[in-house]
Amino acid sequence: MGAFCSCSGADAAFSLQAPWRKAFGTPSPLGHCLPPAGYAAFRIILAVFWSGILIWSGAIAYMSKHNWFVYLTNWGILWQFIYLTSAAILTTIATCSSAPDSKGEATPWFARIVYAMQAGNATVAFFIFLLFWLLVYGPHYVLDPLSPMTHGVNFVVAFVDFLIAGFPLKLAQIWSPMAFGLLYILVSLIFGLAAEDGLIYNVLDWKTGPALAAGISGGVVFVAFPLLYLAFAGISYCCAHCNCCAKHAAYSANGPTEQTPLAEDLVYNKA
């Protein structure tokens, strides 16, 4: 009988059960048709593209004198930039170098951090996309060219990476997007109460509408984030058993073989 998580505690949230170079150098079954160099190129392209979005966003904030760091959208941009860039570097190292390999508790700290960020990447990106169109955008909102990139394309990039990366989600990693959300709520609360003009979003008005702000924040972090994460975990499980590439058809319900060695090696156990 399969299980989503084969280890527990802090190690479950961070470590890879496959050697980290194998984990970062091998795509999921959905991307097994990519050769190693192609997989590295794919991750580099995503990182370079998102670096351009970060620069674009920062340039607009600089020219308009906006406080870039108080907006949830920009936190998401920065999260994706750090994750995609780090993942591209690790995948390139894994496919093009002879760096030492290790797994489990011996997983290097940098691989652990990137793995943890990957776990929350799709959830965070989706909610930034969803919350903007549901709670911020309106008939009188002036939509600039960057907004669709940071509130739509952001999730497309995250979801494509989620499907192709060879990292099935662990249930123990559900804390990753929740920690992101809690940290932002704390910052918005401090800024909202301490700054003279501390209103970031109308739905997070901590001075005049603290009950509504707390309710929306708690609902997103403690209800919506976990539910969406579970949905992505289910998709991840299905992807780990996908035989979409005929070249790797040996990857079947019986588990990974010598020809298709990765996805279940990372997380899933057979009992």
Image: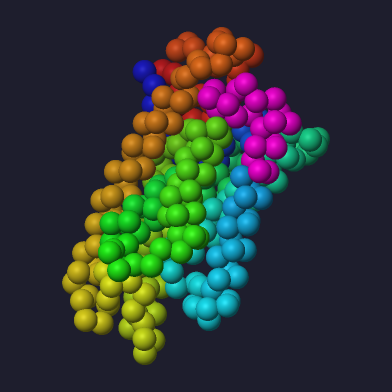
- Residue at 20% from the left image edge and 76% from the top image edge: 209
Quarter of the image holding residue 248? top right
Rendered location of residue 91, percent (x, y): 68, 39
Q: Is residue 43 visible?
A: yes
Looking at the image, the residue that sits furthest to the bottom is: 196
User: Does residue 21 appear to the left or right of 164 in the view shown?
Assistant: right
Task: Establish if 4 lies above or below 203.
Answer: above
Residue 82, position as x, y percentages in the image = 59, 55
Instruction: Examine the rendered structure and indicate whether residue 118 appears above or below residue 25.
Output: below
Q: Quadrant of residue 228?
A: top left
Could you tell whether 212 is left or right of 80 in the image? Answer: left
- The residue lying at 54 percent from left, 39 percent from top is 161
Q: Main secondary structure of the magenta part?
A: helix
Q: Residue furthest left?
A: 211
In terms of depth relative to the viewer, which is nearer, 77 or 251? 77
* Quadrant the C terminus occupies: top left
Q: Nearer the viewer, residue 60 or 244?
A: 60
Colouring used for the render: rainbow
Q: Report x, y in % for residue 80.
A: 54, 53
Residue 262 position by quadrant? top right
Residue drawn at x 48%, y 24% as measured from the top left: 240
In the image, taking residue 165 as reference, residue 93 lies left or right, namely: right
Which residue is drawn at the image coordinates 41% and 73% (left, top)? 187
Magenta region includes residue 204: no
In x, y percent, where is residue 122?
A: 44, 45
- Region rendered in magenta: 25-45
